[in-house]
Amino acid sequence: GRVLPPPDYKMQIIIIGDSGVGKTSFMDRFTEGAHRQAYSATVGIDFKVRRLDIDNKTVKMQIWDTAGQEKFNSITTAYYRQARAAVVMYDVTRPATFQNLRKWFTLLETHARTDVSKILVGNKTDQKENRVISTEQGQRAAQEFGAEFFESSAKSDSNVFSAFEFIATDVMKKM
Ligand code: GDP
Ligand code: MG
């Protein structure tokens, strides 16, 4: 096979948030450019990799997708501590997933590096009829938790790449 030159930067990114918000779809969209319709809860912790070229530098992004654990909250601290960035995701059609954000940000504060880049993502914006959490509500929450804010649709491929591009650029600044 083809041997890739070593990347200029390597970073680990975690995706957390309630079950069903679209974490795995978001990761798959970025790493594979596909949307899975069928719902299958992730078992254990899974990761996928994608390389991005930014300002003539190659960035290897290793994305950790949580699951199973998400309901029990017993996520290993090592997994959090190695992350340079954390995507905290909710579903704009399900208020409970938005109300649970505090829980996820508290876990980050407890277990992640103090300089972890935090990105709040409201996913499923394609579901216009069913949206209950407004963009303004999302922005306010992001401000409160000290996170950058994006709204996305993993299904219709909206803003997924932009969010990861922001992450790569933001983390590179701190390396
Ligand atoms: P996870 O449990 O957070 O990993 O969520 P999944 O990625 O498994 O997605 C849960 C369900 O939501 C699946 O049926 C996905 O197809 C669906 N889904 C994920 N992202 C979107 C999106 O942006 N829009 C819509 N309409 N459905 C989505
Ligand atoms: Mg999943």
Image: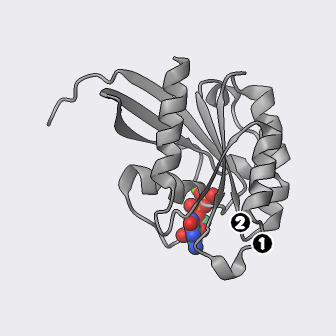
Task: Say if 109 sits above or below 72 in the image.
Answer: above
Amino acid under disc 1: Val
Task: Say if 1 sits above or below 128 in the image.
Answer: above
Identify the mark at residue 165; answer none if there is no mark: none
Identify the mark at residue 132; answer none if there is no mark: 1
From the top left corner, tell me how far across and down residue 93 is, in percent.
72, 71
Identify the mark at residue 92; answer none if there is no mark: 2
Task: Say if 80 sits above or below 147 in the image.
Answer: above
Residue at the farthest bottom position? 129
From the top left corner, tell me how far across and down residue 142 is, in percent.
75, 45
| Residue 107 position by quadrant | top right
The structure residue drawn at horizontal position 52% and vertical position 22%, both measured from the top left corner, is 173
At label 2, counting other C-alpha atoms closer than 10 Å, the crowd grade (few under 14, some 14-19, many 20 or more) is: many
Q: Is residue 57 left or right of residue 94?
A: left
Tell me the quadrant of the picture where the N terminus can be found.
top left
Q: Are marks 1 and 2 in contact (CB under 8 Å)?
A: yes
3D distance between C-alphas at marks 1 and 2: 6 Å
Q: Name the one closer to the observer, 110 or 152.
A: 152
Q: Name the one closer to the observer, 126 or 18.
A: 126
